[in-house]
Image (cartoon, rainbow, N blue to C red):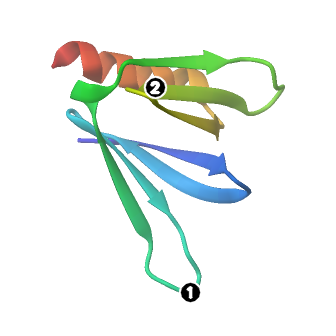
Amino acid sequence: MSTEFTIRESGKNETVKVFNDRIERTVKNRITNNDHQMIPLRIVTSVHQDRKTVRTDKARVVVGIETYEWKVKNAEKFVRAVKEKFLAL
């Protein structure tokens, strides 16, 4: 079972799904097929929300030395979903 969120990164709309053991990110491309990226929850160091913007908050997912920063419409729900799944491992 997964929870799906719409994100915006580098001017593109993308989809992030939070599963019980992973985060899947899908980048929609017009020319080629969609690109998929899988982030195992075991290697996620931290996840938090930045509430500086009015409508779309930023969510940061830190994976080792890599940091993903996305604009998420429901950033609070996204962060809560990732933390719940992470604690359930």
Image-based side of 40 in relation to 32, left or right? left
Determine the residue positioned at 39% across, 24% down: 81
Q: Nearer the viewer, mark 2 or mark 1?
A: 2
The mark that comes first in sequence, 2 or 1, is 1
Classify 65 as above or below 9. Answer: above
Q: Give the image location of residue 44, x and y in percent.
A: 34, 25
Determine the residue positioned at 38% across, 61% down: 36
Badges 2 and 1: C-beta atoms under 8 Å apart? no
Residue type at mark 1?
Answer: Ile
Q: Secondary structure at mark 2?
A: strand
Which residue has dot 2 on it? 62
Q: Is residue 78 visible?
A: no
Determine the residue positioned at 70% across, 53% down: 10
Q: Quadrant of residue 59?
A: top right
Q: Quadrant of residue 48?
A: top right
Which residue has dot 1 on it? 31
Q: Residues within 10 Å of mark 1 (few under 14, many from 20)?
A: few
Image-based side of 42 in relation to 61, left or right? left
List the single residue furthest toward the front: 65
Residue type at mark 2?
Answer: Val
Image-based side of 12 in relation to 39, left or right? right
Q: Is residue 11 visible?
A: yes
Q: Give the image location of residue 31, x and y in percent.
A: 56, 87
List the single residue furthest toward the bottom: 31
Q: Nearer the viewer, residue 63 or 22?
A: 63
Q: Give the image location of residue 51, x and y in percent.
A: 73, 17
